[in-house]
Amino acid sequence: RLRLEIVGDPNWPDYEDQGRLELWYDETDCTFRASQPVTVSSDARDTPLADHKAALDIGANNLVACTTTTGEQYLYEGRKLFQRFRETTREIARLQSKLRESRYSSERIRRLYRKRTRRRDHAQEALCRDLLERLYAEGVDTVYIGGLTDVLGTHWSAETNAKTHDFWAFKQFTGRLACTAEEYGISVEVRSEAWTSQECPQCGSTERTTRHQDTLTCPCGFEGHADLTASETFLRRHTEKAVRPMARPVRFEWDSHEWLESPRSPATESPKEQRTDPSTVHRDGNVASGDSQTV
């Protein structure tokens, strides 16, 4: 015996029933199914379900700094992840130095390469999923990312190139981000981010600002987290939508399995935090995050 009860929802005034409710038994799935045509009012159709924007500043030490027009800011910290990557790389180099002259690799070395790659790819995939779930929940429909074409090889140091290409793999990450965003119906657009890492959001100067470690300062009195400031400047530059006042940034750290929220504020310095080498700041507006003495 099947009992079907239909209860109207007074909180949905925009939907008008059209036609009768149809109920049938799907023998393929062994499931009862029901359908009823409805019409969505013009007022509801004119209101977009998602229209907020987000901009990402992508780096190597701070993997992603994100700002949204809803006023949220997220920072995904990558120093622990890179430390493990570098330790594995050093072990690979040690083993390679012990190979006979006619040999170039071994099964153990190949296993370490695979392990290193899997760790990086797992962290990238988890980051994309975690970030986009948050953006989807906030009603973001477009994410802006900066293009680094020809910048990595032309201006950055060989050491930073190795870190960015091998460890973070910028193109691979942005490709994974775009594929994951498609699942959520979020578009990814590549825009110019030149000077965003040096521009003061308070007075607009790019000549007087100074980046020291993770902090951007300006003689006008501004001081803030460099990567988060860059993502906010990037966002304001490419969207006409009003950006709400910024909430307290949320920092995430990788625990080898998932990205967990950290109680530490990006605006608060900690001896545990390692900072960006100011020598890797370039006039083209892109910032390379170099190695520090302790990772």
Image: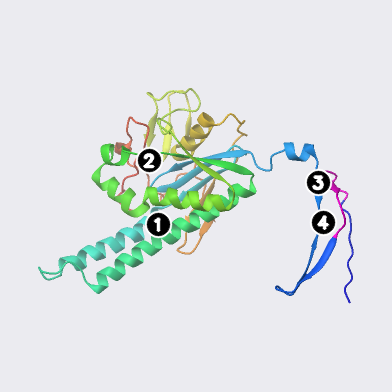
Residue 54 seen in the figure? yes
Q: Nearer the viewer, mark 2 or mark 3?
A: 3
In the image, residue 263 sits, relative to residue 207, either above or below, namely below
Report which residue position mark 3 lands on.
Answer: 39
Q: Secondary structure at mark 4?
A: loop
* Alpha carbons under labels 1 and 2: distance apart: 17 Å
Please report the residue visible at 47 percent of the width from the left and 62 percent of the height from the top: 255
| Sooner in the amino-acid sequence: mark 4 or mark 2 | 4
10 Å neighbourhood of mark 4: few (<14), some, or many (≥20)? few
In the image, residue 19 sits, relative to residue 281, either above or below, namely below
* Alpha carbons under labels 2 and 3: distance apart: 56 Å
Q: Given the image, on which type of amino acid does mark 1 rest? A: Lys
| Sooner in the amino-acid sequence: mark 1 or mark 2 | 1
Q: Is residue 3 left or right of residue 125?
A: right
Rendering quarter of residue 8: bottom right
Q: Given the image, on which type of amino acid does mark 2 rest? A: Gln
10 Å neighbourhood of mark 3: few (<14), some, or many (≥20)? few
- Which of the two residues, 103 or 8, is positioned nearer the viewer here? 8
Tags 1 and 2 in contact by the CB under 8 Å rule? no
* Alpha carbons under labels 4 and 2: distance apart: 60 Å
Magenta region, residue range: 10-21
Report which residue position mark 2 lands on.
Answer: 213
Report which residue position mark 1 lands on.
Answer: 80
Report which residue position mark 4 lands on.
Answer: 36
10 Å neighbourhood of mark 1: few (<14), some, or many (≥20)? some
* Alpha carbons under labels 3 and 1: distance apart: 52 Å
Q: Quadrant of the C terminus?
A: bottom left
In the image, residue 186 sits, relative to residue 80, either above or below, namely above
In the rendered structure, does residue 176 fall within the stretch colored magenta? no
Residue 154, percent across and down?
A: 26, 37
